[in-house]
């Protein structure tokens, strides 16, 4: 086996005061630092002609020199040599990919090599930029993991850049779940490994299970001595480059990844079914309290009395009061909180979780501690066996374990504090290569959802008169299904894209930019790939994006807007909202009077201005709450993991 690279020990989070100091200093120096990288990008471009003119033997000798410097850990610290190495990669990219990185892409590559998360506008070439950085990291011989949003993008990006990787003497592979263990272990030997975050963490935890604790050279030696050796899949953790960094580091990091084994538990199934029937006798606000923006259930005295009277209906194991209340609380959440076509879908009588930020199905994921079975009971599908946890880890703690974390995204605004607090990384907002021509209209504000739907139909009619294509984005699967009926009644022809219709995704995205096309989609449309737009469409104004309602994060709003106006092309985004949208449930009590005032004055400019400020406040509230939840998850999972490791070690010593 090749050299194993131990994960970095997770650092304690900085204090609030320290975070503010670092963020203030980074903001103060931001413009100068960006300008410095832009100048370096121009300097590298100025070196390219010099390397184009070299003979094959001289060029090869220079490339070998850069590879040697990287293996010795000197390339990243010697700026002049790093510039020359990047100029060499530019020439190889021209020769083997038919495209050369622009100066702005080289500037971003330098910032990523230095450990920044880079905000690069959609369509500015993140894939090639990440490829350039991967070559520099791959030359070091240390494992470099490139994380994308899904398997399709991971395989596509690796194949697209394969000629460059071959020319630079680095091996790149793609890892997915379907591989057999031997092939997967072989692919992990590559210098650069493309995969999803879930895949990498799952394989890492499987190695942890084999070693009986967090991976280290000492533990590997002890395990080999005790048990005759284990074949690990991964080479350890060192470099990680994350595409769509905000989505993966923040939006997708809301639940830990758990490696589990199913165990038949007929007693739990019996208890879950009884709890479902029992909960149907309870009424919200009378027997229990469940706040709109909370998931904690508080039982009233009347509810407590009903639970006491109904205890004998449950198996003996649940006669313990705390355990019984947990079981009943899960049944309440399954009925009142978890919504079909929002939090999950049903496919072939199986409950499959849905990623709320993208609308994609998350196969193989489940809720823990009997909650998944409670949801299955509520929707009348066969109950699956509960899972026994073998190992678990939060994505926050996993990414902290890499020695060098970097990445890029088109939307890193408003998350600088969380990124620094959690991962100790700063962000840089890089300018676009071409002037941005995307127009974003002000919110169209409406009192009710019905008013908004009528305005939506009118807006689509108006855009259709020009022949321009429309992308109508929604937050939830059920919204696409409701709007599908409304658009059909209005006589429109359109395509629908959501987690239930993934088979048509590539074809729908490929044609969404054609004249007169209407595409109704959750926020998954075109994420990580371009929607090609015809020249005729560009001449008339480009793709027209309609946002049906604001998301809990303005970043996700801008992810949708960014489907249009890419690479300096024209485009237009129209955000809609109604005062009945769920976002406004995130308003705090002191903001409610302003919300009431905005409702009264909505037909006046002051009312609409007030609504915009309330949208910002509601999104800020939602993000602050989500940040708090992610910190809590990371802390509790890390503590649980340490306890599991301690218990496992004690058990092994006894045996």
Image (tube, rainbow, N blue to C red):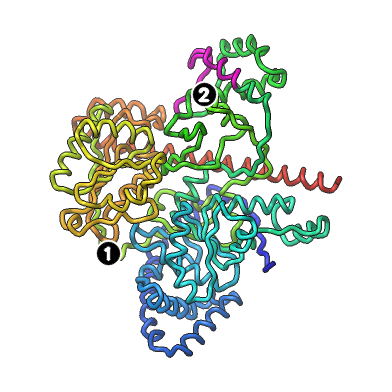
Residue 542 drawn at (x, y percent): 21, 53
Residue 25 visible in the displayed image: no
Residue bearing the label numbered 1: 434
Does 363 appear above or below 280?
A: below
Residue 653 drawn at (x, y percent): 84, 48
Farthest residue to the right: give it.
654
Residue 323 drawn at (x, y percent): 66, 23
> Can you tell which of label 1 and label 2 is closer to the viewer?
2
Q: Mark number for residue 458?
A: none
**Which one is nearer the viewer's eye here, 165 or 572?**
165
The residue lying at 20 percent from left, 33 percent from top is 455
Task: Count residues near mark 2 (Cα–Cα under 10 Å), then give few for <14, some for 14-19, many for 20+.
Answer: some
Of the image marks 1 and 2, the number of the one nearer the N terminus: 2
Does 232 appear above or below 468?
A: below
Residue 281 visible in the displayed image: yes
Does 197 appear above or below 521?
A: below
329 displayed left or right of 108: right
Residue bearing the label numbered 2: 378
Helix, strand or loop at label 2? It is helix
In which quarter of the view is residue 83 placed? bottom left
* Quarter of the picture holding the N terminus: bottom right
Please state the extent of the stretch shown in magenta in the rendering.
273-293
> CA–CA distance between discs 1 and 2?
53 Å
């Amino acid at each position: 086996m090749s050299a194993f690279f131990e994960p970095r020990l997770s650092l304690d989070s900085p204090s609030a005061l320290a975070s503010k100091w670092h963020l203030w200093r980074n903001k103060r120096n931001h413009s100068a630092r960006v300008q410095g990288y832009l100048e370096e990008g121009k300097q590298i471009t100025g070196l390219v002609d010099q390397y184009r003119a070299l003979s094959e033997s001289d060029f090869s000798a220079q490339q070998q020199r850069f590879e040697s410097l990287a293996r010795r850990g000197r390339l990243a610290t010697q700026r002049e040599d790093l510039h020359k190495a990047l100029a060499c990669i530019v020439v190889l990219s021209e020769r083997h990919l038919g495209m050369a990185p622009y100066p702005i892409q080289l500037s971003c590559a330098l910032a990523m090599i230095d450990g920044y998360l880079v905000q690069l506008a959609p369509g500015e070439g993140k894939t090639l930029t990440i490829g350039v950085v991967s070559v520099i990291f791959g030359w070091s011989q240390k494992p470099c993991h490139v994380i994308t949003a899904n398997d399709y993008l991971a395989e596509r990006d690796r194949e697209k850049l394969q000629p460059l990787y071959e020319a630079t003497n680095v091996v790149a592979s793609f890892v997915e779940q379907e591989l057999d263990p031997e092939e997967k272990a072989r692919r992990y030997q590559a210098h650069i490994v493309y995969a999803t975050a879930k895949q990498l963490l799952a394989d890492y935890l499987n190695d942890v299970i084999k070693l009986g604790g967090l991976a280290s050279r000492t533990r590997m030696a002890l395990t080999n001595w005790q048990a005759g050796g284990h074949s690990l899949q991964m080479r350890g953790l060192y470099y990680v480059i994350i595409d769509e960094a905000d989505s993966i580091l923040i939006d997708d990091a809301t639940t830990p990844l758990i490696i589990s084994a199913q165990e038949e538990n007929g007693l739990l199934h019996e208890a879950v079914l009884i709890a479902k029937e029992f909960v149907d006798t309870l009424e919200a606000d009378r027997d229990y309290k469940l706040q709109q923006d909370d998931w904690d259930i508080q039982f009233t005295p009347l509810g407590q009395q009903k639970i006491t009277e109904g205890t004998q209906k449950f198996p003996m194991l649940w006669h313990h009061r705390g355990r019984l209340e947990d079981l009943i609380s899960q049944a309440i959440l399954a009925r009142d909180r978890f919504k079909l076509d929002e939090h999950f879908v049903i496919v072939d009588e199986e409950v499959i979780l849905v990623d709320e930020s993208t609308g994609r199905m998350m196969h193989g994921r489940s809720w823990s501690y009997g909650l998944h079975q409670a949801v299955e009971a509520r929707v009348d599908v066969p109950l699956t066996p509960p899972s026994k946890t073998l190992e678990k880890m939060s994505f926050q703690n996993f990414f902290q374990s890499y020695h060098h974390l970097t990445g890029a995204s088109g939307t890193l605004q408003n998350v600088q504090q969380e990124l620094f607090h959690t991962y100790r990384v700063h962000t840089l907002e890089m300018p676009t290569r071409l002037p941005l021509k995307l127009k974003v209209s002000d919110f169209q504000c409406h009192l009710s959802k019905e008013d908004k739907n009528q305005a939506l139909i009118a807006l689509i009619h108006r855009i259709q008169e020009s022949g321009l294509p429309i992308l109508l984005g929604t937050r939830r699967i059920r919204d696409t299904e409701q709007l599908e009926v409304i658009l059909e009644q209005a006589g429109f022809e359109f395509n629908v894209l959501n987690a239930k219709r993934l088979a048509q995704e590539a074809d729908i995205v490929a044609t969404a930019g054609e004249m007169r096309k209407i595409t109704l989609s959750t926020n998954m449309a075109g994420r990580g790939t371009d929607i090609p737009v015809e020249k005729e469409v560009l001449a008339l104004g480009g793709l027209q994006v309609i946002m049906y309602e604001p998301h809990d994060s303005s970043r996700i709003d801008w992810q949708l807007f960014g489907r249009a106006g890419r690479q300096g092309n024209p485009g237009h985004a129209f955000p809609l909202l109604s005062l009945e949208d769920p976002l406004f449930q995130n308003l705090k009590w002191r903001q409610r009077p302003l919300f009431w005032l905005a409702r009264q004055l909505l037909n006046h400019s002051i009312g609409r201005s007030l609504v915009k400020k309330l949208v910002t406040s509601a999104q800020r509230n939602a993000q602050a709450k989500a940040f708090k939840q992610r910190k809590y998850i990371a802390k509790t999972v890390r503590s649980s993991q340490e306890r599991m490791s301690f218990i496992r070690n004690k058990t092994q010593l006894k045996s």
